[in-house]
Each structure stands twice: as structure tokens, then as C-alpha cells.
Image: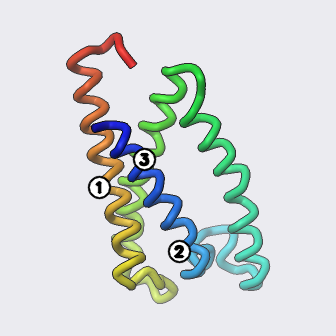
């Protein structure tokens, strides 16, 4: 059950990142919010390239411990990320109000949480396997 939850979490996160461009998420981020909109959008997209490369490399790493810890870290981030979006929902520049945006954000956080529960439960049951 862990692998389908991980893949769902990752797919929902990727979908959210596409939606984040459409919803001008960079306008909510320190360091990008005061830039010209075209520059802010370009930097937001450009910065995701090395982040995505690192994510793909780490979460698919050949060393099981690196892979497992990276997957846990991203899954944990999706839970925190959903909380951040929940707290930002009243911000005047927050545009993630559509059912699609809400589903991508909160389903991703839920999938991340379920993945962590399943993974940590698996580790408790058999701590020496991957």
C-alpha cells in the first residue's frame, strides 16, 4: 500500500505545482512577491527545475536509506504544505480557491500523511527491511 500512496502523493504534488504557476503562487513567496510578475513567474518556474531534479534523484536513489528518508521528507513536507495553504486561504493574493486547486493541495497532504503512517507502521513491524 505504501508505493501507491507514494505515487499518488507525488502525482498530486506535481499537479499542484502546475496549478501553482496558473495561480501565481510566486506572489505569496518571500523573495519573489515583489518582482515584476513576468520575472517572478519565470524565476518560480526556473527554480523548480533543480528542485525537481533533486527530488527525482533522491526519491529514486539506489541506496534504500537515502530513498526512504527522501520520500519521508517529501511526504512530511506535503502535510506541512497543506497546512500552509490552509493558513493562507484568507490572503488577498491567494488564488487556490477552485475545487481542482483545493483537491490537489489537500489530497496531496492526505496522501503524504497516509504514506508516512503506512511507512512508519511497516518500519515498526519489521525495522530491518526496505
The image shows a total of numbered marks equal to: 3
Cα separation between marks 3 and 2: 18 Å
Above/below status of 33 relative to 62: below
Above/below status of 68 relative to 87: above
Q: Residues within 10 Å of mark 2 (few under 14, many from 20)?
A: some
> In this image, 41 relative to 78: left or right?
right
Residue hosting label 1: 110
Quarter that holds the C terminus: top left
Q: Secondary structure at mark 1?
A: helix
Q: Earlier in the sequence, mark 1 or mark 3?
A: 3
Locate residue 101: give its quadrant. Answer: bottom left
Q: Secondary structure at mark 3?
A: helix
For image coordinates 26% across by 35% down, the residue present is 118
Q: Contact (CB < 8 A) between labels 1 and 3?
A: no
Q: Secondary structure at mark 2?
A: helix
Q: Contact (CB < 8 A) between labels 3 and 2?
A: no
**Given this view, does label 3 or label 2 mark the residue nearer the observer?**
3
For image coordinates 76% across by 73% down, the residue present is 42
Cα separation between marks 1 and 3: 13 Å
Percent across and percent down for residue 23 are 54, 81
Residue hosting label 3: 7
Percent across and percent down for residue 7 are 42, 47
Quarter that holds the N terminus: top left
Which label was assigned to residue 13?
A: none
Locate residue 109: give its quadrant. Answer: bottom left
For image coordinates 44% across by 49% down, the residue present is 77
Percent across and percent down for residue 17 are 55, 66
Q: Earlier in the sequence, mark 2 or mark 1?
A: 2
Residue most toward the top?
128
Above/below status of 95 relative to 88: below
Q: Residues within 10 Å of mark 3 (few under 14, many from 20)?
A: some
Which label was assigned to residue 19?
A: 2
Amino acid at each position: 500500500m505504501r508505493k501507491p500512496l507514494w505515487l499518488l502523493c507525488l502525482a498530486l504534488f506535481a499537479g499542484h505545482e502546475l496549478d501553482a504557476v496558473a495561480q501565481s503562487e510566486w506572489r505569496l513567496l518571500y523573495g519573489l512577491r515583489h518582482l515584476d510578475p513576468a520575472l517572478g513567474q519565470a524565476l518560480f518556474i526556473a527554480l523548480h527545475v533543480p528542485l525537481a531534479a533533486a527530488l527525482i534523484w533522491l526519491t529514486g536513489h539506489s541506496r534504500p536509506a537515502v530513498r526512504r528518508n527522501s520520500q519521508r521528507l517529501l511526504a512530511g513536507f506535503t502535510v506541512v504544505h497543506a497546512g500552509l495553504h490552509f493558513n493562507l486561504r484568507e490572503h488577498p493574493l491567494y488564488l487556490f480557491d477552485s475545487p481542482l486547486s483545493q483537491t490537489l493541495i489537500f489530497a496531496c497532504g492526505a496522501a503524504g500523511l497516509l504514506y508516512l503512517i503506512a511507512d512508519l507502521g511497516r518500519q515498526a513491524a519489521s525495522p530491518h527491511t526496505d
